[in-house]
Image (cartoon, grey):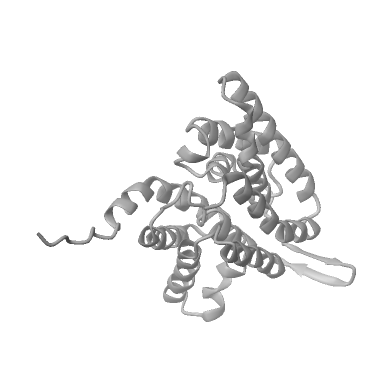
């Protein structure tokens, strides 16, 4: 088992390719990223000091990861004050309130995004597309970069495959049954946000399930709950409440689906 700072460092490294591509494809995403990450670290540092808790808790990298995930998933049209509010709620309402990484119940970034979603946006989300040095970049390239990061984490045994695969498979299956067209069924899988949430949020064991069966149920539940909420161009808006609801159910799923203890003959 790798230590938390090492796990966070590898996770941030795995996010780097997708983050760079998304920043190139969406001008303005970089400023959101800087604001969210710096604010998350600053808020947690102040909160730890006021609570009399050691500053070394910052070294787990969770604040940086929380700010980065919010910056990558929040709509680009979101005003800066609302981004700051989302980060504040994510850090104080989840990470600090529950005592750090070991006690998190609701995924911090998802909690922050849920608060931000309460303020409706008037501008539609921009398309993820750009041409850099003659090479086109769109949502599929960003999604592939996040998927590659997930494969790295799988190889390092930092990520377990059950929840991400179950989420992606459930979205594809339910969309096929509902839509009947293959290209329509797989449209949620072409969104970069789907892969980002599946790998780096649903695959996070801190707020999800621990057991293998529980992780499968967790990912399946997120996909099934999210599908009716998905909107064209806004996959993340359906995934956020689905993840938060499954966060609340995760402890019960682990209990219900835990393997039966072996029988001992008398």
Q: Is residue 184 above or below residue 53?
A: below
Q: Residue extending furthest front? A: 266
Quarter of the image for residue 119 reads top right
Quarter of the image for residue 219 reads bottom left
Q: Nearer the viewer, residue 85 or 202?
A: 202
The count of marks equals 0
Q: Is residue 215 left or right of residue 148?
A: left
Q: Residue extending furthest left? A: 266
Q: Nearer the viewer, residue 50 or 91?
A: 50
Residue drawn at 57 percent across, 78 percent down? 183
| Residue 251 appearing in the image | yes
Residue drawn at 55 percent across, 74 percent down? 186
Q: Is residue 6 left or right of residue 178?
A: right
Residue drawn at 71 percent across, 49 percent down? 76
| Residue 231 appearing in the image | no
Residue 121, how many percent across, how many down?
64, 45
Q: Residue extending furthest right? A: 133
Quarter of the image for residue 233 reads bottom right
Residue 61, how many percent across, how many down?
64, 42
Q: Is residue 106 above or below residue 12?
A: above
Q: Is residue 23 left or right of residue 114?
A: right
Residue drawn at 78 percent across, 48 percent down? 30
Q: Is residue 262 above or below residue 89?
A: below
Q: Is residue 8 above or below residue 215?
A: above
Residue 244, how many percent across, how many down?
46, 47
Where does the C terminus fall, quadrant-wise? bottom left
Residue 65, how many percent across, how many down?
64, 45
């Amino acid at each position: 088992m790798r230590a938390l700072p090492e796990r966070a460092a590898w996770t941030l490294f795995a996010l780097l390719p997708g983050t760079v591509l998304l920043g190139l494809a969406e001008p303005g995403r970089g400023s959101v990223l800087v604001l969210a990450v710096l604010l998350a670290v600053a808020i947690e540092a102040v909160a730890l000091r006021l609570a009399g808790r050691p500053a070394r808790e910052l070294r787990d990298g969770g604040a940086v990861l929380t700010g980065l995930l919010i910056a990558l998933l929040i709509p680009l049209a979101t005003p800066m004050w609302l981004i700051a509010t989302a980060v504040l709620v994510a850090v104080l309402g989840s990470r600090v309130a529950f005592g750090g990484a070991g006690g998190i119940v609701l995924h911090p970034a998802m909690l922050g995004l849920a608060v931000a979603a309460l303020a409706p946006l008037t501008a539609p989300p921009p398309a993820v597309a750009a041409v850099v040095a003659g090479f086109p970049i769109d949502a599929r390239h960003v999604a592939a970069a996040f998927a590659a990061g997930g494969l790295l984490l799988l190889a390092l045994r930092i990520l377990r495959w059950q929840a991400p695969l179950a989420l992606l498979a459930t979205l594809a299956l339910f969309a096929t049954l509902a839509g009947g067209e293959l290209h329509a069924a797989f449209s949620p899988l072409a969104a970069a946000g789907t892969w980002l949430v599946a790998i780096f949020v649903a695959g996070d064991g801190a707020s999800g399930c621990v057991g293998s069966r529980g992780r499968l149920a967790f990912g399946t539940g997120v996909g099934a709950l999210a599908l009716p909420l998905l909107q064209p161009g806004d996959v993340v808006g359906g995934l956020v409440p689905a993840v938060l609801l499954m966060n609340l159910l995760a402890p019960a799923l682990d209990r219900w689906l835990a393997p039966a203890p072996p029988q001992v003959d008398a």
